């Protein structure tokens, strides 16, 4: 459903992404892995309309998104949960979630969607009135994902959702990602936790200096010697 | 009030039409007869630009008139504007006019801030400075050779108010001047401080006790604390040195708080402006303002000066579309005294020659439209400049003091209730 | 005792207007991160508009607000589009230059159009007052105070409870995240800037019957607004209101007890003391990254 063709991004002189092409299909978890600075975050930002100097083509279910502004892309159904959570720090959990349903279409289904998020993430319900800045890292990540789900997205993009979380929480996040996919929302996930993400991804791409150097089924990639050497130190 | 521009633009347009050939003629002739360049340092923008522009325009009319009467010894006079909106501006503009335009004679300055530094730059470079409005006493205390002041100093501006209070107001109030309760208030710039100090010194000479002396910033937005203080003192007379907006604010807030002294004497600069009267309407009636003289009693003027006055008023209205008041006529006096009585009598236009003419000048009282004459003392201060007192009557300024310029008797002493003015 | 009450009252009244001027300034800073040095000129423009509506159409200043405030909002939209938006991604100095240049430019345009004469709106009720016990209360100042506080509270409620308001707060707290939840951040900037202008426009309307206006009136009054914004915490509306009232009262007491020429000095001392104890101001937060409506 998401089709990315020849996506390039240039930051001044730095070519951060060069002619990247890939796709995400309904019911899939797609992994995006690669070393630091490979261009993973840039890819998500280019799709969500956050970066300006992008070229190439992005469409969602046949709808061309290439020239849309960030807020219009959200309205079209792609939600980007950024690296480092980036909540609205001095708003409560509930306010953060409600802002997730800011778009005109999403607003109508706000209450319904809030219930859905609270059933998916019951711990947040207890913390409704707490300021986001006072939450733990894990809780913040939950709110960030919950906020992303509030607009009933057609595709959810997560940038390093497990960054800095304890192993138990990492497991929990991946369970959540699977649940989201199983509830019908495909997920494009960028991760440093290569083993985890490849185990759970239906398909994955490996980026290096802005190029896709390898792709395939998650478990197949895990068997690949080159990848094991480069990313797992094996 | 001064908004009606259509008439003016028509004038400007026709001026341009006939101005073109005239200018070319002039420029051909000036090869033989160079123009006399006068630099005008006034605050043309910024907080003091009301006065700055009024003063400048007065000078401008004087230059027009002199040119039309054949110039100075056959030479045309050209006026160059310099914006002295603050001391740095005055310094750089004075220097710019000297180096770029070759100006060697200056007039100024509306504010002491500009006048003090403008004259200093001129003096340093051997140019001549003719001050008319800046009142700082220090101006004539620096031993400068080529800086003169035809206008009042702070003492001259501050003295008439207590004199008037003692000579006229106290008897009308049936109070012995020695028992008069007086409050002196002033805005806290050099202007307010110097003038109010002069007023206090004069009052003390007359044996008047000052019950309250209070300074405040002219930018203030609330004077009610001051009004409270005044109310608790309940003075017979308030002597106030204020600019325009603070003068308006004080009257309004005194009214709000239901307080009024028996007499109110402003010592400029706000109290003798049209804006002041417009802002407070009928409440202005009865207020005295001591300042540079507004208009002289015609009887005290020479015939030629009466003609000047008529000519000035006519030209000013035509060129600027408003009736000239104190500051405008002052500008005219400053311009005319310089051109007619100094430059025209000097052997050439260098500063030493001008100085010689200035020291020699002996112009009798009544020779300028505001009643002044000119005799400069060894420090360069005009001894024949005097302040006067006007009173707002029927929302117009009427000269009431000194005797020479008095047009009507004072009224409303003591001041009636606010709604009865 | 009466004197203390009267001083407090006068201080609160003028403080309410300071607060209203400052609320617009702090709002724009909190959201756009732009210090609008031309804020004072917008005050001047609103006062001129009120003056001309009064003198040409005979419109009472309070009625004139219905025209002036929307016009100021529009003027804000235009300014944002033409001058502010193109510089939003530029370094801070550029924005400082732009708004500073705008301030000087507007002063000179006003000067060219209207000269530096002082113009006054003189209403019949300008100096009407009533007495409660020993206290004198000016109707006009009371009304201006109430209107200023009502507007400040109104804007706080708007920010807290409306969609646009929450979008504005979200943008203030994290522009990038605001984009990612589907907020049109450019629109938020435009509306916020326009709101800031409308608020200072309202302040101008309320001030018109109290003070004469000339092209420099706003510039003279805006200094205290900058002090208030910093004191209240950059970006904090509640802080601006509290600091505005406080400065008003401090001015009032210090001019009575220490003399009028001391009042700026006194509030400056308060300013330094409070910032020494609390560097971010009353309700400010570190790095001034947020806007809070408490
Ligand atoms: N705003 C920017 N301006 C200039 N260069 C940038 C910018 N953002 C990213 N880059 C550069 O683009 C390249 C890709 O960065 P990106 O953040 O996409 O990497 P990443 O794969 O997400 O890395 P990480 O795993 O560390 O998050 C890097 O070389 C980075 O320095
Ligand atoms: Mg990254």
Image (cartoon, rainbow, N blue to C red):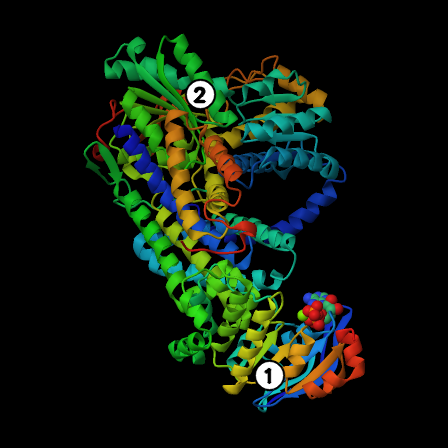
Q: Residue at x 55, y 34 (%)?
A: B59
Q: Nearer the viewer, residue C263 or A135?
A: A135
Q: Is residue B65 above or below residue A2?
A: above
Packing grade of label 2 (10 A; few <14, some 14-19, many >=20) is many
Residue B101 at what x, y percent from top left? 72, 38
In front of the other: label 1 or label 2? 1
Circle 2 marks a residue in which chain?
B
Separation of residues labelled 1 and 2 (CA atoms): 74 Å
Seen at 29% across and 20% down, the residue is B233
Report whether B147 appears left or right of C134.
right
Q: To which residue does mark 1 refer?
A: A65
Q: Quadrant of the C terminus of chain B?
A: top left
Mark 1 belongs to chain? A
Residue at image mark 2: B196
| Circle 2: element type | helix
- Ligand 2 falls in which quarter? bottom right
Q: Does ligand 1 reach within 8 Å of label 2's beta carbon? A: no
Left or right of B129, for residue A117: left
Q: In the displayed structure, does residue A204 sit left or right of residue B14? A: right
Decide if residue B344 is on the left or right side of residue B13: right
Have a look at marks 1 and 2 and say if they share a chain. Answer: no
Q: Quadrant of residue C122?
A: top left
């Amino acid at each position: 459903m998401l089709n990315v063709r020849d996506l390039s991004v240039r930051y001044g002189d730095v070519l951060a992404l060069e002619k990247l092409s890939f796709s995400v299909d309904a019911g899939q978890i797609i992994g995006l892995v690669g070393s630091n600075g490979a261009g993973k975050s840039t890819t998500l930002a280019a799709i969500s309309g956050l970066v300006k100097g992008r070229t190439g083509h992005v469409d969602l279910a046949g709808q061309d998104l290439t020239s849309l502004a960030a807020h219009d892309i959200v309205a079209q159904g792609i939600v980007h949960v950024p690296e480092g959570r980036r909540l609205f720090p001095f708003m409560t959990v509930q306010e953060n979630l409600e802002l997730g349903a800011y778009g005109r279409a999403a607003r109508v289904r706000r209450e319904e969607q809030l219930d859905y998020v609270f059933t998916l993430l019951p711990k947040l319900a207890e913390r409704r009135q707490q300021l986001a800045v006072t939450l733990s890292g894990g809780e913040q990540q939950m709110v960030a994902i919950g906020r992303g789900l509030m607009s009933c997205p057609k595709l959810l993009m997560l940038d390093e959702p497990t960054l800095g979380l304890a192993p138990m929480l990492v497991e929990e996040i991946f369970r959540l990602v699977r649940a989201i996919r199983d509830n019908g929302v495909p997920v494009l996930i960028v991760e440093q936790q290569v083993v985890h993400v490849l185990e759970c991804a239906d398909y994955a791409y490996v980026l290096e200096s802005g190029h896709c150097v390898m792709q395939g089924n998650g478990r197949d990639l895990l068997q690949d010697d080159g990848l094991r050497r480069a990313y797992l130190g094996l | 009030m001064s908004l009606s521009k259509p008439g003016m633009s028509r004038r400007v347009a026709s001026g341009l039409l006939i101005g073109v050939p005239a200018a070319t003629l002039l420029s051909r002739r000036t090869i033989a007869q160079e123009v006399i360049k006068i630099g005008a340092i006034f605050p043309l923008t910024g907080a003091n630009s009301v006065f700055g522009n009024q003063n400048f325009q007065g000078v401008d009319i004087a230059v027009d008139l002199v040119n039309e009467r054949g110039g100075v010894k056959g030479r045309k006079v050209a006026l160059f504007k310099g914006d002295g909106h603050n001391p740095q501006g005055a310094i750089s503009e004075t220097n710019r006019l000297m180096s770029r335009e070759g100006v060697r004679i200056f007039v100024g300055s509306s504010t002491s801030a500009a006048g003090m530094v403008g004259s200093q730059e001129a003096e340093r470079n051997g140019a001549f400075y003719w001050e008319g409005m800046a009142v700082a006493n220090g101006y004539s205390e620096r031993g400068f050779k080529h800086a003169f002041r035809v206008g009042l100093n702070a003492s001259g501006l501050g003295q008439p108010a207590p004199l008037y209070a003692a000579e006229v107001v106290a008897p009308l109030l049936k109070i012995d001047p020695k028992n008069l309760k007086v409050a002196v208030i002033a805005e806290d710039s050099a202007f307010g401080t110097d003038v109010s100090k002069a007023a206090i010194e004069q009052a003390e000479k007359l044996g008047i006790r000052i019950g309250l002396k209070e300074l405040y910033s002219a930018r203030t937005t609330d004077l009610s604390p001051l009004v409270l203080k005044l109310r608790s003192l309940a003075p017979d007379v308030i002597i106030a040195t204020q600019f325009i907006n603070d003068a308006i604010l004080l009257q309004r807030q005194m009214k709000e708080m239901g307080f009024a002294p028996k007499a109110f004497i402003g010592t400029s600069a706000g109290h003798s402006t049209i804006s002041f009267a417009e802002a407070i309407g009928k409440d202005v009636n009865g207020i005295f303002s001591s300042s540079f003289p507004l208009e002289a009693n015609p009887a005290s003027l020479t015939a030629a000066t009466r003609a000047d006055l008529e000519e000035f008023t006519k030209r000013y209205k035509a060129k600027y579309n408003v009736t000239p008041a104190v500051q405008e006529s002052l500008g005219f006096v400053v311009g005319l005294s310089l051109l007619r009585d100094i430059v025209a009598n000097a052997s050439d236009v260098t500063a030493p020659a001008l100085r010689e003419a200035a020291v020699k000048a002996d112009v009798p009282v009544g020779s300028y439209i505001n009643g002044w004459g000119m005799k400069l003392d060894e420090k360069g201060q005009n001894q024949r400049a005097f302040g006067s007192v006007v009173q707002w009557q029927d929302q117009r300024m009427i000269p009431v003091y000194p005797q020479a310029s008095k047009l009507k008797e004072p009224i409303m002493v003591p001041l009636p209730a606010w709604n009865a003015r | 005792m009466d004197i203390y009450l009267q001083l407090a009252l006068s201080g609160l009244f003028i403080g309410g207007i300071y607060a209203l001027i400052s609320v617009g300034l702090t709002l724009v800073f909190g959201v756009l991160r732009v210090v609008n040095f031309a804020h004072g000129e917008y005050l001047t423009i609103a006062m001129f508009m009120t003056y001309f509506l009064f003198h040409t159409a005979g419109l009472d200043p309070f009625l004139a607000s219905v025209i002036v405030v929307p016009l100021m909002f529009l003027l804000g939209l235009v300014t944002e589009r033409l001058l502010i938006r193109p510089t939003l991604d530029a370094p801070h100095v550029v924005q400082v230059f732009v708004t500073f240049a705008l301030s000087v430019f507007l002063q000179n345009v006003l000067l060219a159009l209207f000269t530096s004469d002082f113009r006054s709106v003189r209403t019949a009720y300008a100096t009407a007052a009533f007495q409660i016990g020993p206290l004198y209360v000016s109707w006009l100042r009371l009304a201006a105070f109430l209107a200023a506080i009502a507007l400040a509270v109104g804007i706080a409620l708007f920010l807290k409870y409306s969609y646009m308001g929450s979008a504005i707060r979200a943008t203030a707290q994290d522009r990038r995240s605001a984009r990612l939840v589907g907020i049109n951040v450019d629109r938020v900037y435009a509306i916020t800037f326009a709101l800031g202008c409308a608020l200072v426009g309202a302040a101008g309307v309320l001030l018109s019957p109290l003070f004469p206006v000339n092209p420099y009136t706003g510039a003279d009054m805006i200094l205290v607004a900058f002090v208030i914004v910093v004191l209240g915490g950059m970006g904090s509306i509640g802080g601006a209101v509290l600091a505005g009232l406080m400065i008003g009262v401090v001015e009032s007491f210090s001019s009575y007890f220490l003399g009028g020429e001391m009042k700026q000095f006194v509030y400056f001392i308060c300013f330094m003391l409070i910032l020494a104890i609390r560097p971010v101001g009353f309700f400010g937060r570190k790095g001034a990254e947020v806007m809070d409506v408490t």
